[in-house]
Amino acid sequence: MTSFRVGIDSYCLNPLRLDPFAVLEWVQAAGGEGVQFSEVHPAPGCPLDEGMLRELAADARAREMYLEWGGGQHVPFDTATWTPKDIADLNRRAAEEACVLGARVVRSCSGGFFRWHDDAPSTEELLDAMGRALEPQRAVFEDLGVTLALELHFEFTTFELARLFARVGAEPGGWLGICLDTFNVLPLLEDPVLATERVLPWVVATHVKDGVVSLDTDGLLTFPTAVGKGGIDLPAILGRLATLPHPVHLSVEDHGGSFRTPFFAHDFRARFPDLDAEDLTRLVAAVQRDGPRMAEGELHVTDRADWPALCQERTRRDLTALRGLVASLDEHAS
């Protein structure tokens, strides 16, 4: 039997600007079992301090819900100007907040699409800087019993992150881990199942997101869909996660929008030195599978401007669909 608990990332409901207690209430009413907080909108007169965090932890315990925290960063630069940035204090604060909450995971997100821009440092420069910045922070996370979970977020491929973890001596189950976003690897030309396998031992948190791949004269087009409606092999990914020796919560993250990868530009493809033939073969197969469904209007991009009106109903459907996938996996495992 799996030990999956199903919840959401608060980003799903971000347009509603619910306070964290209201988010917990909403998720419980929708049948969810926990929340990964990407952002927090405190109620008026209720600052984000230790007292509020303790109240939030008590509320989650009373509802028997898991909590995971955000606020971490792993790229030691201001990504607007590429000037160096000290991220140690930010990460210490996020880890201390997580510790108060009883959360064992701090999700780290530092932007993305760096190699889409010519003025950004090279990927290897960024990885070197990350290693130098993160390694001295190890003791902070170990002392607090918290893992900094680097989200797969249009920044670095799983090949590159695996090398980074080896470089800083990050063992699975330790101070540094992965927040597996099942969709975000697609714009980086990785197959979601193969990407999962490459970083599986370090996965400590998730963003479960379905999606679609299309190819046209402008390159690769990818966009999220409701869980179960896209082409990502979520059952296969959950099966991989079920083999881990530690529990991993399944947090839905859904939103509108689409992403472009200039796949046909040779100079751009050269920025992915680990580009793998098996990943590309699977991406081509996904294009062939999803293309007819798009042509028939079954699949389409959800405009970001439309997401505020859609977010509640679609997130409810996502939770129901993901619980169904978990139930099916449990049934086959029993």
Image (spheres, rainbow, N blue to C red):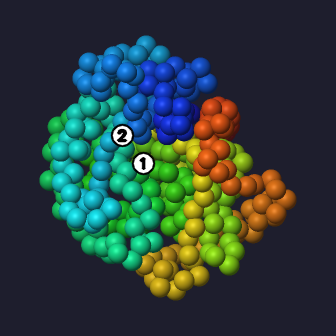
Secondary element at image label 2 = strand
Name the residue at 74% across, 62% down: 290
x%, y% of residue 128? Answer: 24, 68
Name the residue at 67% across, 58% down: 212
Q: Is residue 220 visible?
A: yes
Q: Nearer the viewer, residue 128 or 80?
A: 80
Query: Dot 2 corresponds to which residue?
Result: 70
- In the image, is residue 227 above or below residue 278? above
Name the residue at 54% across, 52% down: 182
Q: Nearer the viewer, residue 136 or 298?
A: 298
- Going from the N terminus, do you reach mark 1 or mark 2 first? 2
Query: Dot 1 corresponds to which residue?
Result: 179
Q: Amino acid at mark 2?
A: Gly
Q: Mark 1 Cα within 10 Å, few/some/many (few <14, many 20+)?
A: many
Image quadrant in which you'd find residue 280: bottom right
Residue furthest top in the image: 62
Q: Quadrant of the C terminus?
A: top right
Q: Amino acid at mark 1?
A: Cys
x%, y% of residue 90? Answer: 23, 44
Image quadrant in which you'd find residue 142: top left
Measure how far apart labels 1 and 2 are at the Cα level. Answer: 11 Å
Q: Nearer the viewer, residue 3 or 167?
A: 167
